[in-house]
Amino acid sequence: MASRADNIASNLNLANFSKATELRQRIWFTIGVLVVFRFLSFVPLPGINPLALEQLAQQTQGGILDLFNMFTGGSLERMSLIALGVMPYITSSIVVQMAAALHPTLAALKKEGATGRQKLNQYTRYGTVFLCVIQGWFLAAGLESFANSAGLQAVVDPGYMFRIGAVISLVGGTMFLLWLGEQITARGIGNGVSLIIMAGIVAQFPTFTANLFEGGRTGSISAGIIIFFIFMVIGLILLISFVERAQRRLLIQYPKRATQRGMMQADRSHLPLKLNTAGVIPPIFASSLLLLPLTISQFAGNSITTDSTSGGIIQTLNFYLQPGEPLYLALYGIGIIFFCFFYTAVVFNPEETAENLKKNGGFIPGIRPGKRTSDYLDYVLTRITVVGAIYLTVVCLLPEYVIRQTGIPLFLGGTSLLIVVNVTVDTIGQVQSHLLAHQYGDLIKKAKLKGRMR
């Protein structure tokens, strides 16, 4: 028979929102913060010429800036105060996470509990500020050099004062976004930083949809391509929703313990291993590395010539590494598979997991604790990572191939779809948790009332 908790979870519906006052307040607070984020994306940096920026954005399409521009909701293209978005924080957190897995001192901090996590978060913020300063300085210098080489005066008054002012503004914008993300996490619903990234991606959806159907109306895009694209997006969303929640659950057995009635009872639990442990990190890393030569040549402008050896190499790489080209797709797939295994090995340590199970008296039935358990976990994790890597490769390469064949500038690539679907599923799960807690609260109140009446 189903438990009371299962019955309550199955009866969750939208009608319960009318009773969950706290949940409604959290949702409205989250929406309000995201509106503030969208307003900030249209506030330009001081000293920027907006008209020249439009031409700059057209001439730098296809590079790594398009990837970052997607995550910032067009803020980078408009050179707003939050042009860097939260990507420096994401990069810093990944670096600190890898360092905590490889460096003994940081690994010891990770095991200290809440105090150690607080110190690691502090190091992450220091790294975020450092990356913001470096990226902001090179971004300001790149705008000035691009204007000098291409004849576009994107900066009204170039010089060190503009660079310093741009760096201060960009650092302040990124740290303010992190503060907004913390407010969403604490007082709203869902993970704040993830919701900010998703809001930036979703904000471009109306414009793309309008352009897509306008192309169908004018005849530049055939109706068959539009229908195929719609079915492809729906299919990818269903695939991502299924695989991202897929787990390999390993049975964990604990020794028998005496209960209050004197009976011996053995405890059981499960160790969940996600099919896609690496998340969206592999496609981001792989695409960033492949688009780096094109980005360098775009910002260098006319200073790169085919007469020099380095210039010729960069020009050749740009020719063969255009998005959608066979070499680009092959290297992109190989990069995704490599970073899947690399990042999974960083975030999940079979030896540490096996040691923790041994300390708590847990074991996998049929597997000896210690080294045998570690080897078994590594064996299972390797097998499911192969499936996860194939899944990520298909999700990321299919949109790139469609872009190349149809010529439609799809902003809904594999990476963006992964982020949107994952954040949406996580947010819906938290909403259901709040509704479930609210219904449990009602049951407790009713039980107390009945007890007083007796």
Image (cartoon, rainbow, N blue to C red):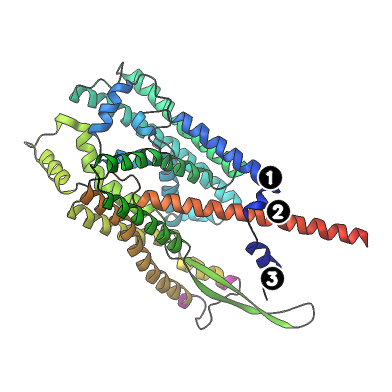
Under tag 3, what secondary structure?
loop
Tell me which numbered mark, 1 or 3, is placed earlier along the sequence. 3
Q: Which residue is mark 3?
A: 3
Cα separation, mark 3 vs mark 2, equals 17 Å
Task: For the C terminus, give its image quadrant.
Answer: bottom right
Q: Which residue is mark 2?
A: 438
Near-viewer residue (417 or 343): 417
Cα separation, mark 1 vs mark 2, equals 9 Å
Label pair 1/2, CB-CB below 8 angstroms: yes
**Residue for point 28% across, 23% down:** 52
User: Considering only vertical position in the picture, is 383 above or below 230?
Assistant: below
Under tag 2, what secondary structure?
helix
Q: Which residues are magenta?
A: 358-372
**Residue for point 25% across, 27% down:** 55
Callout 3: 10 Å neighbours few (<14), some, many (20+)? few
Asked if residue 179 shows in the view, the reply is: no
What is the x, y in percent for residue 251? 54, 76
Q: Which residue is mark 1?
A: 22
Task: For the N terminus, give its image quadrant.
Answer: bottom right
Tell me which numbered mark, 1 or 2, is placed earlier along the sequence. 1
